[in-house]
Amino acid sequence: MAQLPWVDFLQLQSKAHLVAAIVLPTRSSSHLLKLRRLLVTVIEEGRPASDFATAIVRPTEVAQIQCAFLDKGDADRLARLANARPQPQDLGWASHRAFTFDAGMELALAGKLAT
């Protein structure tokens, strides 16, 4: 399905499933964009069943790449690949999981695309 702009997707937030990539250590803006493109490619390779959106956000000093999905199965697929763990349900999403997006995870996800 289609990748939607983040601001449009936020209107669907209460029905959507969030998988947040917590980027550690701190990366440059250009590297964050590269990581976001990698996640979009991983998502698209999985042929999502429904619309999704991604955004680089900084809810704290630590940057996140948030990936939101209308279809829970699409969110589950990324969560499994990244070994994401459940997070508290205080952000208004239907579900919320997160993983650490470090150099090892970057290599692992890039490697999955190469196979």
Image (cartoon, grey):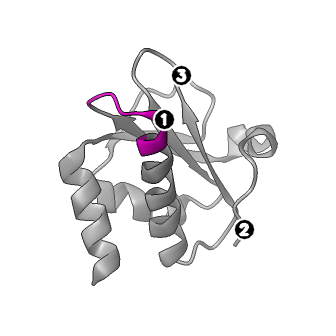
- Frontmost residue, 98 versus 4: 4
Left or right of 59, for residue 70? right
Please report the residue visible at 30 percent of the width from the left and 80 percent of the height from the top.
Answer: 114
**In the image, residue 90 lies in the stretch drawn in magenta:** no
Residue 29 is labelled as 1
Residue behind mark 2: 2
Q: Which residue is located at x 71 percent, y 43 percent?
A: 6
Q: From what the image shows, is residue 2 above or below residue 98?
A: below
Please give the name of the residue rendered at 49% of the width and 68% of the height, measured from the top-left corner: 41
Q: Which residue is mark 3?
A: 90
Q: Look at the image and give the residue range highlighted in magenta.
A: 25-31
- Find the distance from the CA under tag 3 to the CA under tag 1: 28 Å
Between 67 and 90, the one lying in front of the other is: 67
Pointer 3 local density, CA inside 10 Å: few below 14, some 14–19, many at least 20: few
Q: Amino acid at mark 1?
A: Ser
**Image quadrant where one finds the N terminus:** bottom right
Question: Badge 2, how many Cα within 10 Å: few under 14, some, many 20+?
Answer: few
| N-terminal-most mark, 3 or 2 | 2
> Which residue is outermost to the top?
61
Amino acid at dot 3 = Asp
Element assignment for label 1: helix
Local crowd size for mark 1, using a 10 Å CA cut-off: few (<14), some (14–19), many (≥20): few
Q: Earlier in the sequence, mark 2 or mark 1?
A: 2
